[in-house]
Image (cartoon, rainbow, N blue to C red):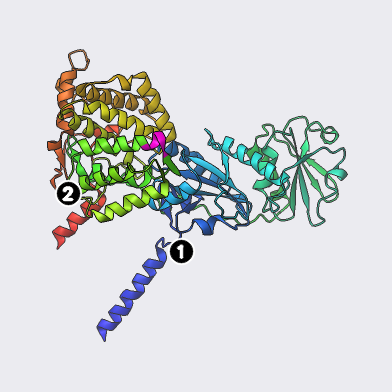
């Protein structure tokens, strides 16, 4: 019976491990894309969206984003800061995020007509699912404070429309006496805090929301030019006065009346009165964080392109980028057909991929207008008909970042278009300039990062992309433009700290590419790009060679090559064990 006891003990231990792990509850997930539950947001997916959004007794600020969008990455810390700052508002308003780069989520993004990232929508409480209900658009801002002010202004408008009944009043009034100021306060309120401020200020409203869960406490906004301000001797604004049930006032205005200092003054006053503060959730941010920055993966040869990167990028573009339009026609449809044309002509195909793309292109050429969901259905249907279409495990190898939020698809897109220009240059005619035109159309109509797309279009116009008419010039145009982007983004918050953006190729990787005084030797650069992106240099994971050389300059660009996938490393370990 000893084996039975061991079995029971093993099952008990496994059960304990499962209970202690982060296991999704129903259709909830802990983390996806740029956010996790530790960021105090609802992480939405196609499976839990309806349950989390519709029919709720609180309003929702919903962010649609794209995890490879640089602007979304830069915005994420601000949105997380806002979420952490307004945790106490959760009975009234909650924050949620949906990653539109995840294929399964794409249908929701189409339904909400999301064409720019990040896209913020305000959904009022008891929101109902309907084709026309896509939320109220709000602007992303450069700071969490400005976003919070914008949100408070929206909530004031909602109250004026009769909604947000569960929130404290955000209205502002004029009063002449303390008695008139607290006349409508319920009898169970022990202290009323009066905030004297201008009508357009949002500080009083923020404070009211911050302490909305304080039992038997009320906060009211009062015009700073009202008679009561003079009675209360308030001459520094925003001003703060506490009024007890016996109408005895206490002036609490701090020397520097910021929102934070006013909140401290309220809490200090209540603490002296032995007030029992509400118990709030403990901040567990970072408890289950997934950080790969310490993952010492094998260092790869930086002067090769990995086929898995190309396939992963192409599949992402077909599954999540071209399908995000609610309706696809006219210029956008033409851009899609041109994109597929250059892929068919110059992509280094393996297996059934070319046959699949030819069928896809021919199908999309049969109609003048397509719905986004139709596009997705065709992509999936033909993928199944030509299976297996992809020959790799579809993971980034050369384009893998030090953390999931870095590099990936954007790196892969640069890599793919460099590969296309080089391979197009080996063909008769002027296929290279066609690649540039197709790239311009793709970035303009389909690339998920709106701000990045605008920057690229401005650069393309400035660098006269449509005047390039020779294959070798197309190769060098893309190289020059990529280095221009690297220069602009060097030191940016979106830059992978392990792979800083440089001007490539570096003197180490291509010493002959620079002349004595540092000027580029363009013929040598062209030869280097041919070696780098030519078909003969494209490798798969099996042929990846470990190296002990210094970090790759190309990995520093958003198109460089470092690190084997963690999963691949684990797989190889298992092979050695068994």
- Disc 1 element: loop
Where does the N terminus fall, quadrant-wise?
bottom left
Q: Is residue 269 left or right of residue 75?
A: right
Image height of 5 relative to 43, above or below: below
Helix, strand or loop: magenta stretch: helix
User: How would you rate the neighbour count of disc 2 (Cα within 10 Å): few for under 14, some for 14-19, many for 20 or more?
Assistant: few
Give, as a single range, the part of the protein colored magenta: 329-333
Q: Which mark is residue 25?
A: 1
Residue 207 showing in the rendered view = no
Q: Nearer the viewer, residue 394 or 375?
A: 375
| Residue corresponding to mark 2 | 351
Percent from the top left, x then y, of residue 94? 57, 50
Q: Using the numbered discs, state the Cα–Cα distance from disc 1 to disc 2 in whole angstroms.
A: 40 Å
Image height of 171 relative to 515, above or below: below
Observer-side mark, 1 or 2, equals: 2
Percent from the top left, x then y, of residue 169? 73, 47
Percent from the top left, x then y, of residue 136? 59, 43
Q: Residue at x 39, y 36 (%)?
A: 332
Is-magenta flag for residue 331? yes
Q: Residue at x 22, y 52 (%)?
A: 568
Q: Nearer the viewer, residue 560 or 39?
A: 560
Residue 283 showing in the rendered view = yes
Q: Is residue 427 left or right of residue 28?
A: left
Q: Residue at x 66, y 42 (%)?
A: 206
User: How would you rate the neighbour count of disc 1 (Cα within 10 Å): few for under 14, some for 14-19, many for 20 or more?
Assistant: few
Q: Nearer the viewer, residue 304 or 136?
A: 136
Q: Which mark is residue 265?
A: none
Q: Nearer the viewer, residue 1 or 500?
A: 500
Is-magenta flag for residue 25? no
């Amino acid at each position: 019976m000893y084996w039975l006891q061991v079995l029971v003990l093993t099952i008990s231990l496994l059960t304990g491990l499962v209970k202690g792990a982060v296991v999704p509850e129903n259709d909830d997930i802990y983390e996806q894309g740029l956010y996790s539950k530790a960021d105090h947001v609802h992480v939405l997916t196609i499976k839990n969206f309806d349950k989390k959004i519709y029919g709720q007794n609180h309003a929702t600020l919903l962010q649609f984003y794209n995890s490879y969008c640089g602007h979304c990455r830069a915005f994420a810390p601000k949105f997380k800061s806002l979420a952490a700052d307004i945790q106490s508002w959760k009975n009234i308003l909650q924050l949620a995020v949906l990653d539109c780069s995840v294929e399964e989520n794409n249908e929701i993004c189409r339904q909400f007509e999301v064409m720019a990232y990040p896209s913020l929508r305000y959904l009022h409480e008891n929101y109902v699912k309907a084709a026309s209900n896509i939320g109220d658009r709000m602007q992303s801002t450069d700071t969490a404070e400005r976003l919070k002010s914008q949100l408070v202004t929206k909530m004031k408008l909602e109250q004026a429309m009769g909604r947000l009944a569960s929130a404290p009043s955000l209205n502002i009034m004029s009063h002449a006496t303390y008695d008139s100021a607290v006349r409508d306060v319920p009898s169970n309120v022990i202290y009323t805090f009066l905030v004297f401020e201008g009508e357009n200020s949002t500080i009083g409203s923020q404070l009211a929301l911050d302490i909305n869960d304080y039992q038997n406490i009320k906060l009211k906004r009062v015009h700073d030019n009202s008679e009561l301000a003079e009675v209360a001797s308030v001459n520094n604004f925003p001003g703060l006065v506490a009024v007890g049930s016996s109408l005895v006032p206490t002036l609490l205005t701090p020397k520097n009346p910021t929102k934070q200092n006013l909140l401290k003054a309220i809490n200090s006053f209540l603490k002296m009165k032995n007030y029992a503060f509400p118990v709030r959730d403990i901040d567990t941010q970072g408890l289950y964080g997934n950080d790969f920055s310490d993952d010492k993966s094998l260092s790869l040869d930086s002067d090769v392109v990995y086929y898995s990167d190309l396939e992963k990028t192409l599949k992402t573009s077909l599954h999540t980028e071209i399908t995000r339009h609610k309706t696809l026609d006219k210029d956008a449809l033409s851009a899609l057909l041109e994109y597929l044309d250059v892929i068919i002509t110059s992509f280094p195909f393996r297996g059934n991929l070319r046959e699949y793309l030819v069928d896809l292109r021919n199908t999309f050429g049969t109609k003048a207008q397509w719905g986004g969901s139709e596009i997705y259905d065709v992509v999936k249907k033909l993928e199944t008909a030509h299976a297996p279409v992809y020959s790799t495990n579809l993971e980034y190898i050369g384009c893998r970042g030090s953390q999931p939020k870095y590099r990936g698809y954007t790196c892969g897109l640069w890599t793919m278009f460099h590969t296309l220009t080089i391979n197009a240059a080996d063909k008769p005619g002027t296929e290279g300039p066609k690649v540039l035109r197709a790239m311009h159309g793709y970035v303009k109509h389909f690339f998920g990062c709106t701000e990045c797309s605008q920057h690229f279009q401005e650069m393309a116009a400035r660098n006269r992309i449509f005047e390039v008419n020779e294959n070798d010039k197309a190769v060098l145009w893309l190289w020059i433009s990529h280095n221009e982007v690297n220069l602009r983004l060097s030191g940016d918050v979106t830059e992978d700290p392990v792979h800083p953006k440089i001007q490539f190729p570096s003197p180490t990787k291509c010493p002959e590419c620079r002349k004595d005084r540092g000027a580029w030797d363009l013929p040598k650069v062209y030869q280097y790009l041919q070696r780098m992106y030519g078909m003969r240099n494209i490798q798969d994971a099996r042929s990846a060679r470990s190296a002990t050389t210094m970090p790759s300059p190309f990995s520093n660009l958003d198109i460089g090559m470092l690190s084997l996938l963690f999963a691949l490393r684990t797989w190889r370990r298992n092979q050695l064990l068994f």
